[in-house]
Image: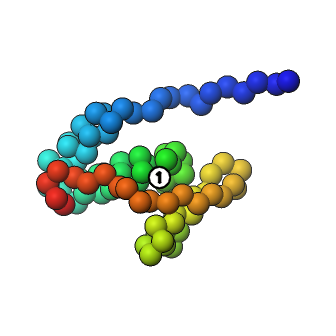
Amino acid sequence: MRGERLPAGRALSRGEVAALLEVCSRDETAAGVRDAALVALLVAGGLRRSEAVMLDLGDYDRESGALKVRGKGGKERVTYLESVPKLESGR
């Protein structure tokens, strides 16, 4: 039987995610909103960085919350974005 290695890296704690979103909320430029959306997408959708950069707007179905994600080796999966963290500032 052949074993598999765990992926490199680690999961962020809720506190770390909250701190990232707080920093984004203090940035009043479009980049702050963009970065907060990206952090929320990565966390809520469970996406890898490489999966996030391959997303197209058409991959998201707003009505159902379904997001088609393309991963390694051309594999596709669907994840649902139901509980996206919100910024404190209400943006």
Residue 51 or 67: which is nearer the viewer? Answer: 67
Q: Quadrant of the C terminus?
A: bottom left
Left or right side of 86 for 51: right
Image coordinates for residue 49, horizontal then vertical, percent: 49, 45
Three-letter code for the amino acid on which mark 1 is drawn: Gly
Please identify the residue farthest to the right as the structure is shown.
Answer: 1
- Whether residue 43 is visible to the viewer of this picture, yes or no, is yes
Residue 50 or 85: which is nearer the viewer? Answer: 85
Please identify the residue farthest to the bottom as the structure is shown.
Answer: 63
The image quarter containing residue 34 is: bottom left
Q: Quadrant of the N terminus?
A: top right
Q: Secondary structure at mark 1?
A: helix
Image coordinates for residue 68, horizontal then vertical, percent: 57, 63
- Whether residue 54 is visible to the viewer of this picture, yes or no, is no
Residue under the image location 24 percent in, 37 percent down = 19
Residue under the image location 42 percent in, 51 percent down = 44
Residue under the image location 36 percent in, 48 percent down = 39
Residue under the image location 44 percent in, 75 percent down = 63
Image coordinates for residue 40, horizontal then vertical, percent: 36, 51
Residue occupied by mark 1: 45
| In the depicted structure, whether residue 82 falls above or below residue 25 | below
